[in-house]
Amino acid sequence: MSYPRPSSCFKGLSSFKGLAAPILALTAAFGLCACASAPPAAPGDVASTVTQAPPEDRSPFGLFLAGEAALDNDADQDAAQYFARADREDQDALIRQKAFLAAVAAGDVDKAAALAAGVGGDVSGGVPRLGRLVQAVSDLAGGRGKDAYAILSKDAGGFAYVDGYQLLKPWAALAAGDGAHAVMLPDTQGQKLNRMAAVLSRSLIDERLHRFDEAEAGYKTLTANAQLGVFYVLSYGAYLERRARADDAEALYKKYLAKIPEDRDLQSALTRVMERRPAPPMPTIAAGAGRALTSAAELALVQRSVEEGEIYLRLGLKLDPTNDEAWLLLGDVEAAADRYPQARDDYARVSPASTTAIEARERIITSYENAGDHDTALTLARELAKAAPEDRGALLILAETLRGKEQYEESAQVLAHVMDADPADEDWTLYFLRGTALSEAGHWAEGERDLLKALSLQPDQPDVLNYLGYTWVEKNERLEQAMAMLQKASTAEPESGEIADSLGWAYYHLGDYHSAVLNLERAVSFNAVSPEINDHLGDAYWQVGRKTEAQYQWRRVLSLQPAPELKAATEKKLSLGLDMPVAPPSVARG
């Protein structure tokens, strides 16, 4: 059985930003889990993308090909330089377009704006429309509000980059001195997330224009939403603080902290207001515009438009390079594409003084873990936990990295410390993680008790069903209940290679080799590069007489960089095959 890990993030570890669309939706879309830890690494602690100048003796076509190759290798800075050189030497439309797009991808907004005039084309086309958006951002960043508003006002429509246009235009109007148009809500065609992002921008603009009644009405509308209101609490609270209504802000923060007590931003806001420290300043026009584009990025990412979301983030950071939320999200986009050095650079841009800094450090650790560098991840996690020994997030990330290094005994001890700190917390993931760690460490009785507790808290949770059911089969205990649990897990997650492997391997242990083959073939179809699953399928093939196919699977295991123990066992099977074991009793399969 492949070692299971919970498919959801820890409860309460996501931060809620007042200017954000739902981060939880983004987490689901990208499969990214965020815990928390300590201050982010300094830029010198993370790998950086090395940019090299284009060779002087290359032809425009050679530079073009070099740019294409750089794009294929995710070297956006290099690609931008190659295409820019090619454009200077040959004013070809395709080269100009490539140079423009590469500059946008590299975050060089001013260079992209200079190239935008030459991209041309139909007004409804994506690239020309992006060109106008980039020019507007460059004008806003340069204090040319009237020029920016003129560009956005002349747009003839279309669907490309529509959210960015709609959310940026009010800020451009404000920068141009047109308050009447700045407070007009765009037509969001009934899309809730777009409309709420627009209402937030209007509330901030109303506040800047001293339209306080209108501003508060907008904030109340946002926070009254049953599903999404939590994302706008910090914005409303900051408004109340700026209006010298500290008691109201304090009550608001306490109300939401009762629901999400681990949220560090809310904790920080409550401490600030209780100590009567200065309120957060009103964002500048450029910062408001930048955060509006961050909201557009989040909307795009929720819709899985990753390229568009990344562009919005880079444009927003041009307007407000201090937007820690945008740096975090850009790092998440890079990490989701396995561009870990770039992601670490982005996370390192988060201000050490920000409450978001602890998230940035955690994500740097996770990036090393996901890249397979468990030693570095564990070193950083230990440092983090030492710096914040009572911090829940710091301890959880340490427990996870210890699991990654198969140091289960210590992982269970760390989790026990977290659970002892809050005995009333009935988070199923804590019991599941400690139960599996105890089991892997050889303490099955204690591990089983935790797993049963997790199952009582989440009776239909596939990870718990998978691990507990399989272990019972392996120990020849509660066989009918165990198989029913594995089948239930497989029904809940029919495309999980890990669960299909567990079910198939359970059939194998029970001597039902034909059912084992069927399920293990499904498992391999979902996770073709797992050496463990391929090994299991090879064993099952051997037992049903398909020995040539079994040897093929075992040879494939050796090509997938298996662990030393599995490698040795597989080589032995290739040499000697398998002895036919005595089949244990079969069980009811429902």
Image (cartoon, rainbow, N blue to C red):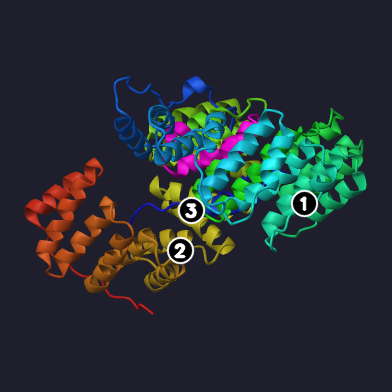
Label 3 element class: loop
Which stretch did the figure color magenta? 313-342
Give the residue at mark 2.
465
Q: Relative to residue 218, is residue 20 drawn left or right?
A: left
Check if mark 2's residue and mark 3's residue have beta carbons within 8 Å: no
Give the residue at mark 3.
6
Find residue 586 and report its image quarter: bottom left
Q: Is residue 461 magenta?
A: no
What's the CA distance linking mark 2 and mark 3?
11 Å
Tell me which residue sits at (38%, 22%) in the image.
52
Looking at the picture, which amino acid does disc 1 mark?
Val
- Quadrant that contains the N terminus: bottom left
- Quadrant that contains the C terminus: bottom left
Find residue 499 and report its image quarter: bottom left
Task: Using the image, tell me which numbered label, if any, was put on residue 199.
Answer: 1
- Image position of 512 with respect to 452: above or below: below
Looking at the picture, which amino acid does disc 3 mark?
Pro
